[in-house]
Amino acid sequence: MLLVLVLCLPVLCLPVTYTSAARDPQVFTTEPGNLYINDVLMKTPDSAQVDGITLFPLRSAFESLGANVLWIEESNEVAIEYLGEFYLLAVLHYDGDADYPTQYFSIKNVNTNAPINLTSMTPTGGGQIINNRIFLYQEGATLLLHALDCTIEFENESRTIRINQISTESSSPSSTNSSRPH
């Protein structure tokens, strides 16, 4: 037993190095997709996928839910009024790997000043700005909509997003035109 320990000890003390495999650049597509709100197909110009994963179109989805959405250029934020509550989404730029140009976002309820986590670990979540539109990754969109009493399902093959409101209240849709991300 002592002989085995003496022979194995030098192996256990060797340094361990990790190497990462080369990554391919992300593949973006913006073909038409489907957005269902409470099982009703909504007309939306926004649809995007990254590496075959459907992204959440922030403005189109919230306006389809009846929210008012406004881009605030001075502060690089998106104001959302949904069911009498006000939310502020901040665009936090990230100068990371050029092949993976993820941008990070944070959102908080302005009424309570409480952040809404967009990942399981932190309040910030990833996404992309594509054609001046904000798209959140699926994890952030799911956590955000669950915090707003909605369910969400993604069907990547058909580029479909299904959102169902748990709350029975609704507000009237409104659109604000802007050439900035929203």
Image: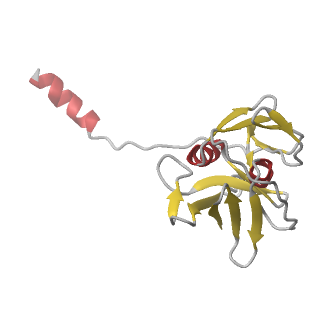
The count of marks equals 0
Residue furthest to the top in view is 1
Residue 105's x, y, as percent?
A: 62, 60
104 or 143: nearer the viewer: 143
Image quadrant for the C terminus?
Answer: bottom right
Q: Residue at x 23, y 29 (%)?
A: 8
Residue 42 seen in this snapshot: yes
Residue 54 quadrant: top right
Residue furthest to the bottom in view is 74
Determine whether, in the image, residue 82 is placed left or right of residue 109.
Answer: right
Residue 116's x, y, as percent?
A: 54, 55
Residue 64's x, y, as percent?
A: 80, 48
21 or 150: nearer the viewer: 150
Q: Residue at x 88, y 65 (%)?
A: 177
Determine whether, in the image, residue 105 is placed left or right of residue 14.
Answer: right
Q: Residue at x 66, y 46 (%)?
A: 137
Residue 89's x, y, as percent?
A: 64, 63
Q: How is the image coloured?
A: secondary structure
Image quadrant for the N terminus?
Answer: top left
Residue furthest to the front in view is 169
Residue 139 quadrant: top right
Q: Residue at x 70, y 56 (%)?
A: 101
Residue 96 seen in this snapshot: no
10 or 175: nearer the viewer: 175
Residue 4 quadrant: top left
Q: Is residue 122 above or below residue 55?
A: below
Determine whether, in the image, residue 19 is placed left or right of residue 126.
Answer: left
